[in-house]
Image (cartoon, rainbow, N blue to C red):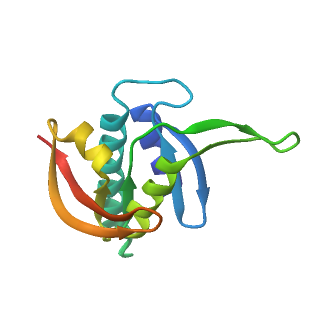
Amino acid sequence: MVTGFDEIMERHGLEKIRTIGDGYMAAAGVPNARPDHAHAVADAAIDMIAFSRELSDRFGFPMRLLVGINSGTVMAGVIGRKKFSYDVWGDPVNVASRMESQGIPGKIQVSPATYELLKDDFILEPRGRISVKGKGEMETWFLIGRR
């Protein structure tokens, strides 16, 4: 699965940040800014959901992803002196994590910031308000696909 996700990231020009347990974190626009960052992440997320369904069908093992997307300015850089790792951090990362953890299996949940960047080119279904740790109530949407 991770190899397939890595291929999806490469196809869409995204930066894989890390895998932790069953989590997979990627970003667009780092280390180099790109104007289509939200679109690239949305397309990759749609491909990830399709790929996980394909694997489920092929191996008869139920696999339902929780996917969360947020947009915003983050800090990024190489951390460490002996065992280097590239990482991103900041409030947008935390909100993206909440979009994932409070999502629904098989759905792609997006924040208001991402909704604003995608609404003209993608089909987004309102989920409604959810309680987001550190943010309070937040309106969210499910990303369905491209228009």
Up the image or down, 71 lies above or below 110; here it is above
Depth order, front residue of 67/130:
130
Q: Residue at x 83, y 45 (%)?
A: 83
Q: Residue at x 18, y 48 (%)?
A: 145
- Determine whether, in the image, residue 123 is placed left or right of residue 64: left
* Count of number-bearing discs: 0
Extreme-right residue of the structure: 82
Give residue 109's quadrant in the image: bottom left
Q: Position of residue 5 (x, y in %)?
A: 46, 49
- Determine whether, in the image, residue 24 is placed left or right of residue 145: right
Q: Say if residue 6 shows up in the picture.
A: no
Up the image or down, 47 lies above or below 65; here it is above
Extreme-left residue of the structure: 147
Depth order, front residue of 60/137:
137
Q: Residue at x 34, y 37 (%)?
A: 38
Depth order, front residue of 8/79:
79
Q: Position of residue 129 (x, y in %)?
A: 24, 67
Q: Residue at x 47, y 24 (%)?
A: 33
Give residue 80's quadrant in the image: top right
- Determine whether, in the image, residue 87 is placed left or right of residue 111: right
Q: Say if residue 36 shows up in the picture.
A: yes
Q: Position of residue 39 (x, y in %)?
A: 30, 36
Image quadrant in which the C terminus is located: top left
Q: Position of residue 85 (x, y in %)?
A: 72, 43
Up the image or down, 47 lies above or below 121; here it is below
